[in-house]
Image (spheres, grey):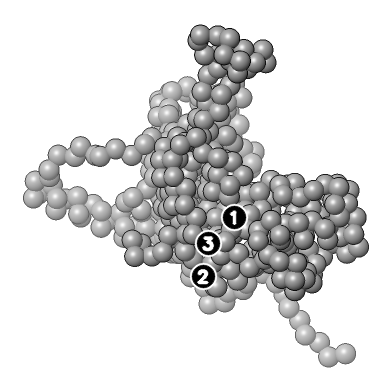
Amino acid sequence: MENREIAIHVEGLNKIYKLYSRNRDRLIESLGLSRKPRSTQHYALRDVDLDIYRGETVGIIGTNGSGKSTILKIITGVLHETSGTVQVNGRISALLELGAGFNMEYNGIENIYLNGMMIGFSEKEIDEKLQDILDFADIGDYVYQPVKTYSSGMFVRLAFAVAINIDPEILIVDEALSVGDVFFQAKCYRKFEEFKEKGKTILFVSHDLSAISKYCDRAVLLNQGRKLGEGSPKEMIDAYKQVLVGQYELPEAANVPDLTADEQVREALEKKKRQQAGVNPNTLEYGTGQAKIADYYITDQKGVRSSAILKGDLFTMHMRVKILEDLPEPIFALSIKNSKGVEITGTNTMFEKAFLDGVKAGETKEITFTQKMRLQGGEYLISLGVTGYEKDEFKVYHRLYDVMELTVVSDKDTVGYFDMESKVEVKDI
């Protein structure tokens, strides 16, 4: 990537806010009436480095308060950094939180011109783009009403229409698309595809992990103002799910002793054996250790172990779990993802009301999920988990992400992920 042109460069970025326990402390400190500070420092961003390359689509994910919106606002110039460097190479169009850059008293048309001129367009240039903006927004005569009368859905329609029709080199979007209806969201994502084909740069924040997985070339994970990592959307989404349950650990250099020649041979044979059985040797594994998934495998409808299943057949996912501590009501879960990391389907014993009891240390449970294979032909990944709630707190006792590969063999595929097993008739009338 070193030879590619950088669209956005962020280095050593810090954003610090002062927090006061009382309003009068703010006044006392601002007037210099106290020798000691009356405030505490809160890092919204701490030592963040990030490069976005021209033509990339990059998603930023993280929990609430992780600094996602803050970094977008600094890149777009809405906020100023406390320290660090931000360089932007190209014309930016940004869709931040609702209301940003709009005058609530102006009508839609007036706000289109206001936004366009703020970005640097002449009135004539906006005239030429006006019809495209109106067609995309599709809010009818409401465009002549003050925007303070708009619903949130109408507002985001107009704001996004302006943002994508002023021919930006870099498009920045902060979660706003979640406000629109499903038809408008589909329309916006089609525009993302057009932008990618034109080599434009897109940076967006979203809690929609499927969108991150589908549209992004790369994802960045933030937590409590720090960048935990960046990489493929699948890798970062898996890490984000660890963060959500407090199980994420910063990667450290592994201290692994050198293996003897015999040990290397045995390890290679074991790895090959696992791969032949459809088991992923690089499974992401974490949990509290109060339970352990000790064994797992798939059988076809004849009861034969196999990781290749015919579409339309029944198959069973087997999971054996050792209980290491007393647990109130453990939940045993199965999910299936595509190769990009998008969760396609899944279930668990709580959803199915199949097991709602407590368990004792030393017990072993055999769990089977028997289902009809309706997925389209292709390669999928299976994840397994043992979770539960303790005094309303969600716990992950043991989780195995992408533990097995599942191949679906099919001689007829339809559109999308699932085959709805349609019966189609054509009759003469």
Q: Which residue is depicted at the point 54% across and 48% down?
A: 75
The percent coordinates of residue 19 (x first, y second) are 58, 21
Q: Secondary structure at mark 3?
A: loop
Q: Which residue is depicted at the point 41% across and 37% down?
A: 47
- The answer to which of 26 and 366 lies nearer the viewer is 26
- Looking at numbered disc 3 in the image, what kind of residue is underneath it? Gly
- The answer to which of 352 and 10 lies nearer the viewer is 10
- Looking at numbered disc 2 in the image, what kind of residue is underneath it? Gly
For the residues marked 1 and 3, what is the alpha-carbon distance in whole angstroms? 12 Å
Quarter occupied by residue 388: top right
Classify mark 3: residues with Cα within 10 Å, few (<14), some (14-19) or many (20+). some
- Looking at numbered disc 1 in the image, what kind of residue is underneath it? Ile
First of labels 1, 3 by sequence position: 3
> What is the number of the mark on residue 90?
3
Q: Secondary structure at mark 1?
A: strand
- The answer to which of 62 and 80 lies nearer the viewer is 80
Q: Which residue is depicted at the point 77% across and 61% down?
A: 113
1 vs 3, front mark: 3
Q: Quadrant of the C terminus?
A: bottom right
As drawn, which residue projects farthest toward the bottom?
428
Q: Which residue is mark 2?
A: 199
The percent coordinates of residue 297 (x first, y second) are 41, 51
Position of residue 376 relative to residue 7, above or below, is below
Quarter occupied by residue 69: top right
First of labels 1, 2 by sequence position: 1
> What is the number of the mark on residue 172?
1
Position of residue 138 relative to residue 128, above or below, is above
Q: Which residue is depicted at the point 82% across and 58% down?
A: 110
- The answer to which of 362 and 113 lies nearer the viewer is 113
Would you say 364 lies left or right of 410 here? left
The percent coordinates of residue 53 (x first, y second) are 44, 60
- Is residue 169 at least partly visible in the picture? yes
